[in-house]
Image (spheres, rainbow, N blue to C red):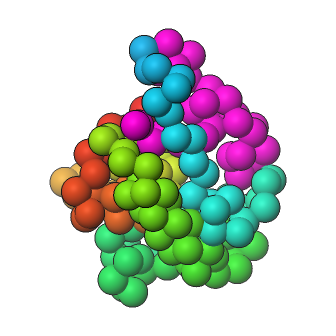
Amino acid sequence: MILVSACLCGQRCRYDGKTKENKTLMGRLDREAILPVCPEELGGLPTPRPACRLVGGGGDDVLAGRARLVDENGVDRTEAFLKGAHRTLELARSHGVQRCCLKAKSPSCGSKRLALQGGALPEGYRPVLGVTAALLLANGFPVEEIP
């Protein structure tokens, strides 16, 4: 079983109500073995919703209580992101997920370069993980970031 960001599967669950369907990825995966998830919707956020940014660190920092997620209106959405990440982890465990293909540049699913509130990351930055990506990696699930 492969856990895949639902937006990559063609579901309209992104913050802007759009999809980021990745036909190349879907073509190389067996659709019977895909578990599509949207951690932000699992956390109770609506679609569409205001865009969110990590503030004070990456997903690993959010999990440790050192950072948070704030939407473009200044509303703290940290609890919804944490709830969605934990529900995604529960699904991964209960469905015997072997690996995860997650959407790049997402405050939930991103596993490489993410924008932090305040602009671009400085040279020599460490990779900033999304909340769900950080939780899955911390629990031994391999994560592949998909553009």
In the image, is residue 93 above or below residue 33?
Answer: below
Q: How many marks?
A: 0
Residue at image position (40%, 37%) is: 1
Q: Is residue 11 left or right of residue 127?
A: right
- Extreme residue in the bottom direction: 65
Residue 118 percent location from the top left of the image: 50, 66
The verdict on residue 17 being magenta is yes
Residue at image position (51%, 50%) is: 106
Residue at image position (48%, 46%) is: 105
Residue 2, quarter of picture: top left
In the image, is residue 31 above or below residue 54?
Answer: above
- Extreme residue in the left direction: 124
Residue 140 percent location from the top left of the image: 22, 57
Residue 109 percent location from the top left of the image: 46, 51
Residue 70 in sight here: no
Residue at image position (45%, 64%) is: 90
Q: Specify the segment rendered in magenta.
A: 1-27
The verdict on residue 136 being magenta is no
Could you say which is closer to the camera, residue 90 or residue 23? Answer: 90
Q: Is residue 136 left or right of residue 88?
A: left
